[in-house]
């Protein structure tokens, strides 16, 4: 079948494209312009949504004080000798080597956005520059913990766009706070800035949460 090719602006170049040989692995690309390095992440083709989200959070560094994340998605990014996060970090460091003033933006949709958030956590933990994280319809993969320094760094850089009636960003429940009702936007806690997209409004609306 014929694949759609998108023409990029003149100063935008795909510097690295990873096509997964295994359909259970994520795919990703590094795209550079004069002032920005973009990392975009696509979810695996054959991994089931329920299987990946149906797991208890686990500390990403093995300590109880560490950031608690979705263990299956975290392991997906770190398995093998040439694991995905290591390859992504190498490519981003290379893109910043000669142009350190560039911003670094990580983005993805659905599980791809969820993986992007976890990649951002790994990069920040290695002192790699991350300017912004953009997610669209992303499930929750990081336990809310405003006392954790790495969580605060992620929170300050992340913006999540959510269709007002999309159930996926509300899942899974094990990442939701259990100390109160969940019926209002103020009790719908999330990592980062929460932006609702609704067909009844011509623009996205920022929705406050208990972390604002």
Image (cartoon, rainbow, N blue to C red):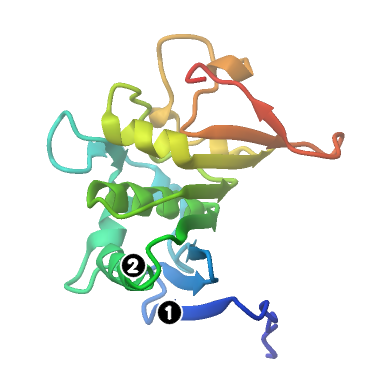
Identify the residue at image location x=59%, y=46%.
137
The quadrant of the image that shows the N terminus is bottom right
Q: State the CA–CA distance, disc 2 to disc 1.
A: 9 Å
| Picture disc at residue 206 | none
Identify the residue at image location x=42%, y=48%.
117
Q: Position of residue 112 (x, y in %)?
A: 49, 57
Tell me where residue 67 sits by quadrant.
top left
Q: Is residue 96 above or below residue 49?
A: below
Closer to us: 42 or 147: 147
Q: Position of residue 152 (x, y in %)?
A: 36, 31
Identify the residue at image location x=38%, y=42%.
54
Q: Is residue 37 visible?
A: yes
Q: Is residue 125 above or below residue 188?
A: below
Can you name the residue that lies furthest to the top here? Answer: 180
Q: Is residue 182 above or below residue 79?
A: above
Q: How many marks?
A: 2
Q: Is residue 82 left or right of residue 162?
A: left
Tell me where residue 77 sits by quadrant.
bottom left
Q: Is residue 210 above or below residue 9?
A: above
Q: Which residue is mark 2?
A: 88
| Picture disc at residue 16 | 1
Q: Position of residue 24 (x, y in %)?
A: 38, 69
User: Helix, strand, or loop for circle 1?
Assistant: strand
Identify the residue at image location x=37%, y=50%.
120
């Amino acid at each position: 079948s014929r694949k759609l090719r998108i023409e990029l602006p003149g100063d935008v170049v795909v510097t690295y494209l990873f096509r997964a040989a295994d359909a259970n692995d994520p795919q990703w690309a590094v795209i550079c312009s004069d002032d920005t390095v973009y990392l975009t992440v696509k979810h695996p083709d054959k991994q089931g949504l329920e299987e990946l989200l149906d797991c208890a959070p686990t500390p990403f560094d093995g300590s109880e004080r560490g950031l608690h994340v979705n263990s299956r998605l975290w392991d997906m990014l770190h398995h093998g000798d040439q694991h995905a996060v290591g390859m992504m970090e190498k490519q981003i460091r290379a893109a910043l080597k000669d142009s350190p003033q560039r911003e670094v933006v990580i983005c993805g949709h659905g599980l791809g956005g969820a993986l992007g958030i976890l990649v951002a956590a790994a990069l920040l933990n290695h002192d790699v520059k991350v300017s912004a994280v953009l997610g669209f319809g992303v499930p929750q993969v990081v336990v809310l913990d405003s006392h954790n320094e790495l969580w605060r760094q992620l929170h300050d850089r992340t913006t999540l766009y959510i269709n007002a009636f999309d159930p996926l960003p509300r899942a899974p429940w094990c990442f939701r706070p259990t100390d109160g009702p969940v019926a209002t936007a103020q009790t719908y806690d999330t990592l980062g800035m929460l932006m609702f997209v609704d067909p009844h409004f011509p623009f996205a609306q920022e929705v406050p949460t208990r972390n604002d």
